[in-house]
Image (cartoon, rainbow, N blue to C red):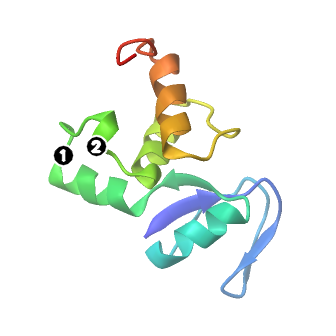
Amino acid sequence: MAEVKFFNTVKYKGVRYPAHTPFQVADEDVDSLVKSGAIVLVAPQAKAAESKGDEDKSLDEMTVNELKAYAAEKEINISKVEKKADILAAIKAAEGEGDENE
């Protein structure tokens, strides 16, 4: 299960969630919820990686959902970007690694 929140009140599977309230969603619903404005707090892949202790994965190897979860965990604002390359660039810039691969 992934964890998301919205900036407005939403109804998911018959339950209303107030704005800014984190709640769990089915893994297969994450992409459509993100398109509807959800902010992913804990991505399904990130939970799997945490449970395995897989912290050696580089940013370049992460999926979009893993990058979003990483950014949320590190409190990096990526709300204005959607593409993986842009998310990756925003994270690297926030961590001071922006010019490393150019």
Judged from the image, the secondary structure of the residue bearing numbered disc 1 is loop
Classify residue 51 by image quadrant: bottom left
State whether residue 70 is above or below residue 21.
above
Q: Give the camera-side residue of 12 and 35.
A: 35
**The disc labelled 2 sits on which kind of residue?**
Glu
Residue carrying label 1: 54
- Can you see residue 22? no
Determine crowd level at label 2: few under 14, some 14-19, many 20+ residues with C-alpha closer than 10 A. few
Quarter of the figure that contains the N terminus: bottom left
Judged from the image, the secondary structure of the residue bearing numbered disc 2 is helix
Q: Which mark is residue 28?
A: none
Q: Give the camera-side residue of 64 and 71.
A: 64
State whether residue 60 is above or below residue 4.
above
Across and down, in percent, residue 34 comes to 63, 61
The residue positioned 55% from the left and 31% from the top of the image is 75
Q: Viewed as shown, does residue 23 lie left or right of 11?
A: left
Quarter of the figure that contains the C terminus: top left
Residue carrying label 2: 61
- Can you see residue 25? yes
Residue reaching furthest to the bottom: 14
**The disc labelled 1 sits on which kind of residue?**
Asp
Q: Viewed as shown, does residue 14 lie left or right of 82?
A: right
Q: Give the camera-side residue of 15 and 98.
A: 98
Across and down, in percent, residue 23 comes to 59, 65
Count of numbered tags: 2
Across and down, in percent, residue 8 comes to 83, 59
The residue positioned 52% from the left and 61% from the top of the image is 3
- Point out the frontmost of discs 2 and 1: 2
Classify residue 29 by image quadrant: bottom right
